[in-house]
Amino acid sequence: MWLATTLILGVALVLIVVADRRQEARYLDRAAAALRAAGDDGVRPNTLDGALDRLERATVVNDEDLTPRRAMAALDQMSTGAVLADETGEIIMRNRVAAPFATGRHGDALVEAEIQARLGDALRGEVTDAELRLHGPPERVLFIVGSPLVIDGEVIGAIVRIDDVSEEQRLDAMRRDFVANVSHELRTPVGALSLLAETLDGEEDPAVVANFLGRIHGETHRLNRLIDDLLDLSRIEAGAGDHLEEVSVVALIDEVISTMRGPAERAGVTLGADQDANADVADVDVIGDRAQLFSALSNLVDNAIKYSADGDAVHVRLAAHGGDCAIAVVDEGVGIPQRDLNRIFERFYRVDKARSSETGGTGLGLSIVRHVAANHGGRVEVVSQEGIGSTFTLILPTRATSEVDVEAVWGGAR
């Protein structure tokens, strides 16, 4: 709100200066015309008349070199679009953000039409606003406000402010979805625990009691894992952490494989590590939070195991090129449909909800991986085909920020 008020006050000052300049120009025009008309009565041409012309030009140059230009430079630095009109509706000024709307096509033309409508209302003394949604991709949402500029009860002009609220609305939608998803995910195990406890009350058959206790233990484990993942995600979203150190990527992979070997054996999945024979990866180090990196790689390997069948293999491959390292987790599992690839890194998004419930997944693992990659100046990429398997590649900078071409690293081979 204070920004909008400051903006309106600033452009009002500009408008007053411009109006004063125009008034002075009108006085000078009338004076010059009178002198010219009196030229036959002894006023020599190109004397006082010329002096007045020079004075007029000097006044305009002075004004243009001071307040209006400074105000325009300030308005151009703002992320908010601003369009300023005088009392006749003539547009005096557009800042850098608002300028493209004047000559734009398609969506920009719709914005310009809305700007003109808001100016018309403002010049009648009304404050009006409108929300304009432009379909993308990407979709944009603009909030357009028109306000009159009033001095001593007289409308001397109008200003229209154009705010791009696309990101704010996207974040609001994500927050709403997150709250809804968390509520749903917590309600499921809590409801199951309540039902199991009620059913178990008064039950005397040892076999039934043992069965129900096992299910209660499973739901409790699921609930604990969800809470742990939420806490991890919250910490990871806050940044790279306070424990930055040199992390050996080879040692990190060995630790993850050692940790995940038990789940892999229980699932009948072969788990192993490969290294790019064409690159020296023995001494590859990254600067980062070891706990976060371990969490990210563990999530990728855990997913690969869960979505593989008995007898499948999961490989963790390491390559180093140009200043980046690429850690690829390759599986022979069910794969991911193309329509879901753009959404799998969203919190709680699941490709196969029934399969996720069976495996005990929380839907937060890939979101954690994405945030860890971003915290360390890297990224995560995925290539997948249904029925053949998936390759998730965690790309991290080692000593530079150059990008790794994943296809070049693995030659397109799975």
Image (cartoon, rainbow, N blue to C red):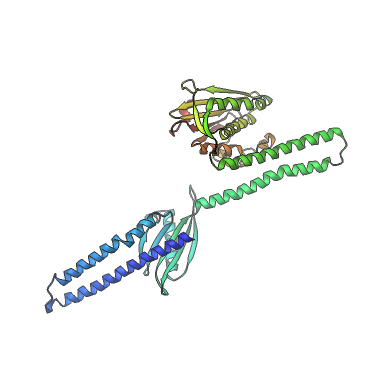
Most foreground residue, 75 or 114: 75
Outermost residue toward the top?
277
Residue at x-position 49% and y-position 50%: 139
Q: Picture coordinates of residue 130 (x, y %)?
A: 49, 61
Residue 253 in which image quadrant: top right
Most foreground residue, 117 or 153: 153
Q: Is residue 401 left or right of residue 355?
A: left
Q: Is residue 230 left or right of residue 320?
A: right
Examine the rendered structure and indicate whether residue 126 appears above or below residue 197: below
Residue at x-position 30% and y-position 69%: 22
Residue at x-position 28% and y-position 71%: 24
Residue 344 in which image quadrant: top right
Residue 95 visible in the picture:
no
Residue 191 in which image quadrant: top right
Q: Picture coordinates of residue 211 (x, y %)?
A: 80, 34
Give the tally of numbered discs. 0
Outermost residue toward the bottom?
41
Q: Picture coordinates of residue 361 (x, y %)?
A: 65, 36
Q: Is residue 11 left or right of residue 55?
A: right
Q: Picture coordinates of residue 327 (x, y %)?
A: 53, 29
Residue 161 visible in the picture:
yes
Examine the rendered structure and indicate whether residue 284 appears above or below residue 117: above
Examine the rendered structure and indicate whether residue 332 appears above or below residue 357: above
Most foreground residue, 278 or 134: 278
Examine the rendered structure and indicate whether residue 18 appears above or below residue 392: below
Q: Is residue 157 left or right of residue 302?
A: left
